Image (cartoon, coloured by chain):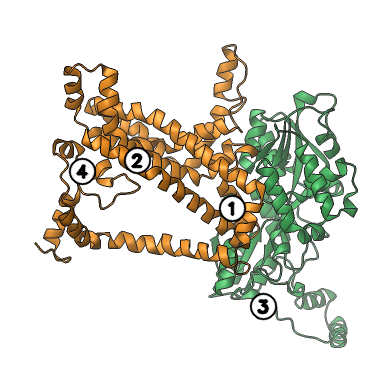
Chain colours: A green, B orange
Amino acid sequence: MLYSRKEFGRSRLVALLGMLAVSMPLATATIAAAQDKPVAGEVKEGSLKGKTLTFVSFGGIYQDGQIAALQEFIDRSGVRLLSDGPTEMAKLQAQVESGNVTWDVVDTADFAPYVHCGKLFQKLDLSKLDTSHIPPGQVGECNVPAMNYGMIIMYNTEKYKDNPPKDWKDFFDTEKFPGVRAIDGSGDPIAGLIEQAFIAAGGDASKMTAADIDKGIAKIRELGPDTIFWKTGAESQQLAEAGEADLIMMWTGRAMTAARNGAKYTPVWKDWLVVMDHLAIPVGARDPDASYALINAYLGRKSQEILTEKTSYSPIHNEAQPKVDETTAAYLTSTPERIRQGYQHNIPFWVQHYAPTVEKWTELMAGN
Amino acid sequence: MRHFPGNWIQAREIPLHIRDTHPCEVFGVSISQTGLASTAEAASEPAKPPPRRRLHLAGNALWLTVPALLLLLGVVGYPLLTIVLRSFSEPMWGLQNYVWFFGTPVNLVVLQRTFEVSAWVTLACVICAYPYAYMMTAVGPLLRMLLVLCVLVPFWVSGVVRTMAWVILLQDSGVINSALRWAGFGTVRLIRTQQGVVIGMTQVLLPFMILPLYSVMRGIDLRLVQAARSLGARPSRAFLQVYLPLSLPGVYAGAIIVFILALGFYITPALLGGPRSTMLSTLVQNQVLSLLNWGRGGAMGVVLLVATFILLALAAPLMRQRHRQGARR
């Protein structure tokens, strides 16, 4: 078996290492020790021969990039990898309830693996994965990140000229910065935005209570009836390229593409909202060890570099050095500077208040 | 005369026999009137309903519907039953999902809006489709082919693509507003408004109105209009009293198809509308996909379905009566 680690007692391991150190060069000893623990990106030759895994994601360039990142894993392990999608919790729920789970590894949006942890997704045995290179705070009980991206404000460069907005407070200040706002209305509530709205309303996000969710949402509502809630990433990009809104909340990938296509907008990086996709294993997956092997390979440095080069999403391996052009590099969120500027919403709080938040967010989206 | 269900030769005759009967009458509009049969022929005969024979034939023809019925039971009936059951059983047995639906203001506002938008779209479709379908019957074969193509080609293009095209046209910096500004008029707010949604949905749904209308109008004997004219009716009167009543079955058939399809629209309101044009399908999607709340999502679907049935039941007698008037002439 691939990751059934030989259960050495610590003392025996130390003794063995000692012996090896005496008899062999030190480098060999390190390799021997490393074989006990999984190393991100590594997989044993031929270890999954004859097996089939189904990898589920959101399609398009993103899933193509993920498959490209997994190509070495496929070649080495001998696994047959199938793609499916798009990820939908309702579909997964139907599979889990009927006891016929055909998905082995699922790429999900930000909230799902936290909200459905233990119900639709297995709690992960982290000893089967090498999570040592993942940025801090991104590993959940049921999930590891699949990639990182950000939500930033893009402002109309010509409109604000010398006095541009600098942060979310300015985004919510319609007097100092008049103009049409565009907000991500593509689905789940944007927890980071509600927190920033609450801060702009004078609150302290670290002490947020259930009642404060209303205050945050009220602040967003105050932006007025002209506010655009875009439904797809493509729409947000289109808004920027056509100059339809003055302050657009955008995913970094879309912001980058809009800028590349000539949109005269400038990013605001202060407190950019950290967003990510996750990888998780469904409850009742047929061969969890094979799923772990896939995820562990995916977390490898080389895989992450390929992923970024193909998709322009940021890698989740802290040593990854993807070769990308200047514009792409400018919108990556994995540089030390960007990591310092990022804003991470309070995941446990929002998971706890998920259902009422979705209701309130839906009301906001439905114009009530 | 006895027909055996297995006798194909006799069975093949059945559509001819039943075409001026109404076994497939849907909400007062007979399918045979809208498309299958030549209405002109039916119009030249006095309406002579042979009730007993009609029943007999309808029973015998039933097996022809078996493939369609099986398909409907499997892919519509069974899932629908599951949805209805789940709306009463999740998370526990009872009416809680319906209590929630009617107790939440946003649901009622959006339900009402869904019907309003669908009604506007239906009206806009009738207004646009009627003269167009008439043109199709009045021109020569080559031009008719061109007109049919104009209807069908957009029909083959993905709805998302068509909707995105409308975004380009309607947006504030779009083609229409640029032209208006160039001509010295101000900007008109089109996108992210209810009007924008109605425009986009009308274009997407127009073929569903034009085609039934055309198939009915094609069967109208234009000599009847000429006769009216020769008897001294002015063109407007000949149209209103002869042509229009004859074409009404097509209007009803098209209107019902368009209205029902419009009720379930999702992509177009999402892309062309703002928050104030969200339709019910978006809320259903939220309940099911984001919250995995099948009970509430199901209850919303059931409410929409029942409301649709009630509305059609209210409209049906009116339509049937009008239709008879038209048939009586």
Choose between B322 and B147: the one closer to the eye.
B322
Residue A124 occupies quadrant: bottom right
Structural crowding at the residue carrying mark 3, measured as other residues with C-alpha within 10 Å and reported as few (<14), some (14–19) or many (≥20): some
Q: Are marks 1 and 2 in contact (CB under 8 Å)?
A: no
Name the amino acid, label 2: Met
**Mark nearer the N terminus (1 vs 2):** 1
- What is the quadrant of the C terminus of chain A in the image? top right
Residue bearing the label numbered 1 = B285
**Does residue B125 appear to the left or right of B192 in the view shown?**
left
Label 2 and label 3: CA atoms lie apart by 71 Å
Residue bearing the label numbered 3 = A2
Choose between A277 and B97: the one closer to the eye.
B97
**Mark nearer the N terminus (4 vs 1):** 4
The secondary element bearing badge 2 is classed as helix
Please determine whether, in this image, residue B231 is positioned above or below residue A233: above
Q: Are marks 2 and 4 in contact (CB under 8 Å)?
A: no
Residue A125 occupies quadrant: bottom right
Q: Does mark 2 fall on the same chain as mark 1?
A: yes
**Residue A364: x and y, percent?**
70, 44
Q: Are marks 4 and 1 in contact (CB under 8 Å)?
A: no
Residue at figure coordinates x 69%, y 34% from the top left? A259
Q: Are marks 1 and 3 in contact (CB under 8 Å)?
A: no
Please determine whether, in this image, residue B323 is positioned above or below residue B237: below
Residue bearing the label numbered 4 = B37
